[in-house]
Amino acid sequence: MFRGDLFEGDVIRQFESAFAEFVGAHDAVAVPSGRAGLRFIYQAMALDEGSEVICSAFGYPVVPHLTGSLGYEVKFADCELVTLGMDPDELRKTISDRTKAVLVTHLYGIPCRIREIAEIARSAGALLIEDCAHCFGASVDGRKTGAWGSFAYFSFETSKPINTLGGGMVTTSDPRAAERLREAAAREPVKDFAWLFKRLLKTTFETTVTNPVPFNLGVYPALRFAGRKDQSTSRFASGYQPDEITMSGRMGRYTNYQAKLGLAQMKKAAAPLARRNAHARRVIDGLKDGLRFQTNDEPGVESNYMLLTALSPRMEELSHKLLGLGIDTKHHYMRDCSGLNEGGPPFARAAQAEREVLHLPAYPELGEAQIDRVIEAVKRARSLLGTTENIGQPSAAG
């Protein structure tokens, strides 16, 4: 603050250069948020209004909302139930000579089948955009996610592997597009102390309430109480609305202070990513006879397991039982987005994924004893549910 480089300075460019080198992209541009990055990508691509863009039917609804709001025709390809990413076979059925871009998401830190998808897009003459909001550090054949397409965008929100109090990064293989992206980012208004104070306050609050002592004394009992109530809400509730409010709080110029945070975290990201992966593999190995997990076990694939994801036909029952046993889980983070296209075809696997996906704790801050407690709690929950069969057995839609 006293040096005067809190909001603008040289570290932003240093962070961009380090990030581009890490990913293996031609260039990287710091942006206000992941979704702002996607908007800037569309602007840099300069597609004609009405151009066809294919998205995965299972994902974050803001992505197709934003795509459609910019005047593009959104089409969906169903997901697969292994990686939960776009199914290449479904993409082949959907892509046409009208398709100008294919937008794929590497969900929860697991790379989708990007080799096949990239080849399909290339053969059709469509640009490939990678949604890497969850997937920093993952790779396929030694090539990082974010380096397979013409563009990719990453998120640096507080829950992500790189946390810079918000913000994100766009990578690209196109030098001219990089210039247009940088110009768009530079046109954003400069942030102020009020913004920084709010972000620091929000992050401090999140850190405090998830500390074991206040979480166990206050937050966890509140979660258990809330879990007894009917939690049914609109499928496209807060954060999923198809209007400009989805960009609220997500714009404004990326700051030098954020870049310093990001550059420092990049230098030490390998160790927590390795712990996260080790925890995930420990849980998967401990429950492989009881649950089906999201994976990509193809040769040459390295995931980051940002969220350890199980699939169960009795997901909500299992979640409630685990909460009663002291294990907090997460679900309904991603949705079957096909309903956004009124009158469009249903997508069975996207609908199944929405019903069945459950995220189990495997955070790098946990110790092995805590990970083993998660495993035992899941086994106990299955017993309480009276489940003797594999509750993660794929259905016919898989």
Image (cartoon, rainbow, N blue to C red):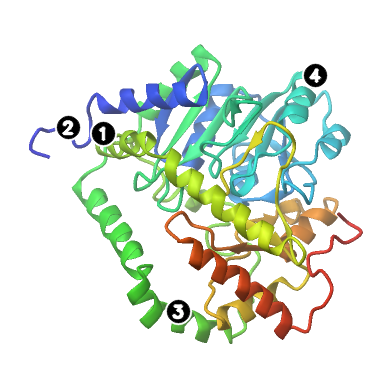
Of residues 355 and 365, the one drawn nearer to the viewer in this rendering? 365
| Residue tagged 2 | 5
Could you classify mark 2 by the number of other residues whose Cα lies within 10 Å: few (under 14), some (14-19), or many (20 or more)? few
Identified at 51% across, 38% down, the residue is 136
Q: Left or right: 42 with respect to 123? A: left
> Which of pointers 3 and 1 lies earlier in the amino acid sequence?
3
> Which of pointers 4 and 1 lies earlier in the amino acid sequence?
4
Identified at 86% across, 37% down, the residue is 89
| Residue tagged 3 | 220
| Residue tagged 1 | 256
| Residue tagged 4 | 123
The residues bearing labels 2 and 4 have C-alpha atoms spaced at a distance of 46 Å
For residue 219, which quarter of the picture? bottom left
Q: Identify residue type, mark 3.
A: Tyr
The residues bearing labels 3 and 1 have C-alpha atoms spaced at a distance of 36 Å
Q: Identify residue type, mark 2.
A: Asp
